Image (cartoon, rainbow, N blue to C red):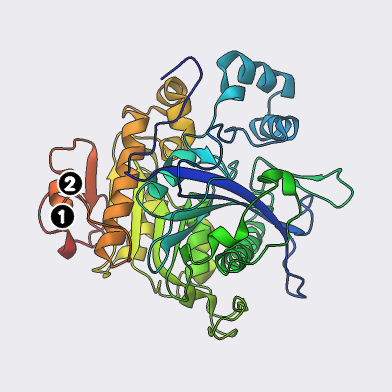
Amino acid sequence: MGFFPSLPKPPGPLPVSTFTLESPIESTLHTPHPPSPARPLKTSLIRVYYPCDPSTGTSKAESWIPRPFSTYIKGNAHFLRVPPLLVWALSCISGLLFTRLPCRKDATPLKRDGGWPTMLFSHGLGGSRGAYGAYCAGLASHGVVVAAIEHRDGSAAVSYVSTSDGKGEEVPYVRVFDQKVKEKQVHVRTYEFREALRVLRALNAGHPVEVANSRWHAKNFNYESWKGVMNVKKGQIIAAGHSFGGATALSACKDIAEFHLSPAPNSSTPDNYPFSEEFAATILLDPWMSPTTTNSHIPLPTPTLTVLSGQFYKWSQNLTAVKELHRGRQESKCWVATRSAHLSQSDFGALFPWGTKKFAKAEENPVKVLEWNIEATRAFLRDVGVDGIGEGKDVDEAIWRGEEGWEGVRCEERGRGLHVEGDFGSEF
């Protein structure tokens, strides 16, 4: 464990690396504007987790707190409504300032025939590109390339935008209570999904990607090494997110008209089709359903896995919406980690287990919850036919039998129905 707060090592057989990429937004008249005081979108910022060659890159991984430290510590203080000096002091005293992601940095990606399955991941309120490092790195260790987006809609605790003059701009957290503004934020976030996918396709073609800040990755970054690494074909992308990010993933998978993607260079993929056709599966961790009410009438076209914390499971209005999403969908599944908290789905639970237990009443070991989330995601993607996931431990019943605190949810029933054993395929 060590002296400083740390994240668990990725559980899979593949070594993992990360790199961060900030790219200018593709110029378009349809770029949505975030709510004030957040600024219009200028760049797209993603952190990519991927299987790597461990003999390359550097073992000195990314800091868990994104850089520049001063911007993100001040922004988190604003989000938490506490003095910045207090956050600085706690970060230093606890050692969080020195905590790093459990993987390498800027290593050469491993390749497989057909490319690795590829996921776009959206963070929740107050999150960042690094707030789900354990989950994203865990999936990468099992053969999934994960692009964690840092949103500039005002929902991140703060985000740093690189500018041509080198001074940079800060996108502050915007406290939103109006439903219409929340829906506008989802619209912006869905656009950022589109931009992230555009960048990944260009990267996968082996072409140099225009960057807004070369400091995020190695100066000798080898774009050619990324040629063919990912499976980013139409209809093969995995959409995922936590909380508000779950609402974002849902909205992206239901986006039937507003965004039309241009193909990667030399691609035969048509450039005009509904964005919803990009996705093969949806992964929702504690989805916040309220911001999705305007498109709730649109059927979700993808197989969907939902994992609820015990805390969100007790939220009856949200649970009703989750069940409605799953009702009648045999290929989808819904689980609950009954003794976990909302923060258990992110790195915060593993980094601050005492705080999660004391203030969020989480009784389950947060590292165990992360392991469950990773294994549930891997098993689900394998079962719905996502190529490249590899063999799972066993069928779901065998994976979870004897695991106390992890239960299936009966989405066909009203109220809080739980199901633990039996044929899960008939329960959802």
Foreground of the two, 50 or 319 = 50
Quadrant assignment for the C terminus: bottom left
Q: Residue at x 37, y 67 (%)?
A: 113
Q: Position of residue 247 (x, y in %)?
A: 50, 58
Q: Residue at x 32, y 44 (%)?
A: 13
Callout 1 secondary element: loop
Q: Is residue 316 above or below residue 414?
A: above
Residue bearing the label numbered 1: 395
Q: Is residue 254 above or below residue 43?
A: below
Callout 2 secondary element: helix
* Residue 401, image quadrant: top left
Residue with the most extreme left position: 422
**Other-residue count near label 2 (Cα within 10 Å), few / some / many at <14 / 14–19 / ≥20:** some
Give the number of the disc on residue 399: 2
**Spatial separation of the CA atoms under disc 1 and disc 2:** 6 Å
Quadrant assignment for the N terminus: top left
Q: Position of residue 50 (x, y in %)?
A: 47, 50
